[in-house]
Image (cartoon, helix red, strand yellow):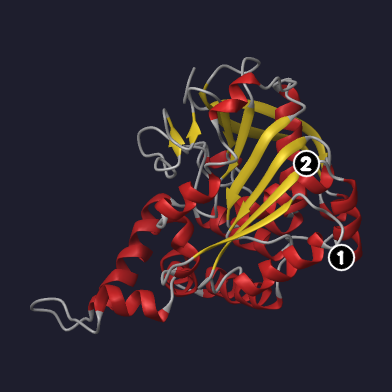
Amino acid sequence: MNGIQQRTDVFDFTLEHRVNKRWIPLCYQVFGQPIGTAPVVLVNHALTGNSQVTGENGWWNELIGENKTIDTVIYTVISFNVPGNGSDGESKNLIENYKDFTTRHIAKIFWKGLHSLNISQLYAVIGGSIGGAIAWEMAFLKPNSIKHLIPIASDWKSSDWLIANVLVQDQILNNSNNPIHDARMHAMLLYRTPESLKAKFNRSKNENEELYQIESWLQHHGKKLESRFELAAYKLMNHLLKTIGEDMDSEQLLAFAEETSAKIHIVAVNSDYFFTAEENRETYKMLKTVKKDVMYDEIQSIHGHDAFLIEFEQLNAILKNIFTTTTKLETIQV
């Protein structure tokens, strides 16, 4: 069943405003070693990603696989689809009441999914962007069930800047005649930087066309997402960004840091406009006042937020000491 999409079910789950979901299908994929035979690494996908983290069409192939940094010869790698992200291929499972969900709910659902697989301890939880935020939320819920917490290009909370952009995206998604296309064009300008776009296009135009290449590139990304992503899924995933850390404040974060047994590895991107490096540095400095096992690394890139999907040489170098062959000798409860 390696890499095959499977499903477990969550029943009678309470959301915001005491809304009860009688049934939530939770799809997932397992890569590498069978469950129960090796340390477990949970990989959380980003906004338009899915559980296909490695293999054909794997979005983190440069990081995960045989003899890669997260070595599927050594680890059991699991990834869930965020419920309602549309990747299960079932339109009936899309979520219309998207504002009833938060990242904390997704974290709870993921833990329930792991429990259904008889997994109570994780060697690592890793994710980029909103996937990293869900990793934070999972650690808040179970401070002593994760050995390595690795949020990348993310943070434990939504900043004012992020909340503002979620509102703009939500307005586009609910008012545009081409909502996915137009929202994606706007989002790409948050995921990249002026320097990245200059390096890529440098004001050039397409041959025999009036459009600048940057305009064609944005239109292409809008059409590409429109062809593979559902509107309801985009509304949900965008809304979740706003809810990161809603139930936490700085004092609670410090209390968590004092309690947790997890080693926290924060990885930021120096040019990230979405989850800024400065916010991550503040998080690191705060946690370091009460906890020794907190590490901070910063990817150097002109490409902004998307650097966690581009700068694989740097990312592999940062993560290699966490995922070493010595883990073969470790016994992790499953």
Q: Amino acid at mark 1?
A: Asp
Residue at (44% x, 75% y) in the render: 189
- Which quadrant of the rendered structure holds the C terminus? top right
- Residue 175: image location, x then y, percent: 54, 74
Q: CA distance from mark 2 to mark 1?
A: 19 Å
For the point 54% across and 68% down, which residue is it? 173
- Which residue matches tag 1? 249
Disc 2 crowd, CA 10 A, few/some/many (<14, 14-19, 20+): some
321 lies left or right of 178: right
Amino acid type for the residue under numbered disc 2: Lys
**Position of residue 95 in the picture relative to residue 207 (left or right):** right
- Circle 1 packing at 10 Å, graded few (<14), some (14-19), many (20+), is few
Disc 2 is placed on an element classified as helix
Q: Residue 165 or 32: which is nearer the viewer?
A: 32
Q: Is residue 331 visible?
A: yes
Residue in front for this viewpoint, 165 or 265: 265
Question: Which image quadrant is residue 232 in?
Answer: bottom right
Instruction: Find disc 2 in the rendering and name its residue.
Output: 108
Residue sitting at x 49%, y 17%: 1
